[in-house]
Amino acid sequence: MVEDVQYSATPEASQLFTEGDRHLTSWTDYLKLYKPEERWLQDVTALRLLSSAYSYVMTLSRFLPELMEVEKDKLELHVIGARAEAMMPRYLWDELSFFHPGQEFSIKLVGDHVPVMSARKKTPTTRSNENEFVHLDLINGLYHKIESRKLGNPDAFVLYNPGVGHPRLRESWEPTIQAVLASRKPALITSFSLEDQQRDIAALQELVANSPVLKHHELRFRCRAKQNSFRSLKYQVDPSNVGVPIQTNSRVMVVQLAPITEEKSSTS
């Protein structure tokens, strides 16, 4: 017993509780935290259901290190073009504080599909039930049209499956994407498929090359474009291409606008 008390005061014991089993790389790892029995791990239906519910939060959790420029006690994130993620149950977002203990999150979900909700009066009961480390705000409207004082200055952006390069969406996305890139803050962007991601990258690079606001800058990848290990395992039908199934948050990348260095510009 004395040995246990002594060990509990060591740095190793502290790491055991703050880091143990929290750096996950797959849905199987995640399921093991809650249902370690083999029958659950072999149940593909359970994995599909779990992944479709938690894909948004776990994608953000997994790539948070690439999204953060500096370590901060409180991180402000703007989730742009929010749709399904704006209607998720509150408790799903609380997973962030489990995987990043001590980190405070202020998350603003912004978009013209975000539900308009009247401010809920907080009671002692609701205050005690809410996670003090995760704050959510719902803001209805197009990001580039909302007053900056209402939005504040984020540390980073998140765009879930925005389709910024989709032929039908590209033009409408341009003003918002220009504002996001011009901030020179990191942006996590997911896509439904490889084709979707390739279109997004092409649209971003073309905007950077042609916009007077973004000239003398280039798009840099803090996380290369790749398949997302925390994509939804549930397949959906793409209305514009019914022959090719898609997955929510299938692909992921973290990008940031950066000035072209003099050395680079002189050799180009």
Image (tube, rainbow, N blue to C red):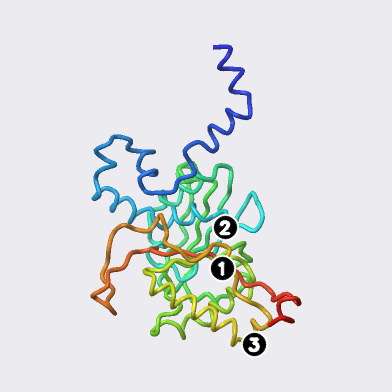
Q: Secondary structure at mark 2?
A: helix
The mark tally for this picture is: 3
Residue 44 can be seen, yes or no: yes
Q: Which image quarter is the N terminus in?
A: top right
Q: How busy is the neighbourhood of tag 2: few (under 14 within 10 Å), some, or many (20 plus)?
A: some
Question: Which residue in the structure is indicated by mark 2?
Answer: 66
Q: Which residue is mark 1?
A: 255
Q: Are marks 2 and 3 in contact (CB under 8 Å)?
A: no
Q: Disc 3 marks which amino acid?
A: Pro
First in residue order: circle 2 vs circle 3: 2
Helix, strand, or loop for circle 3? Answer: helix
Residue 196 percent location from the top left of the image: 39, 74
Residue carrying label 3: 212
173 vs 21: above or below = below
**Label 1: which secondary element:** strand
At horizontal 59% and vertical 31% (from top left) the residue drawn is 14
Which residue is drawn at the image coordinates 66% and 78% (left, top)? 217
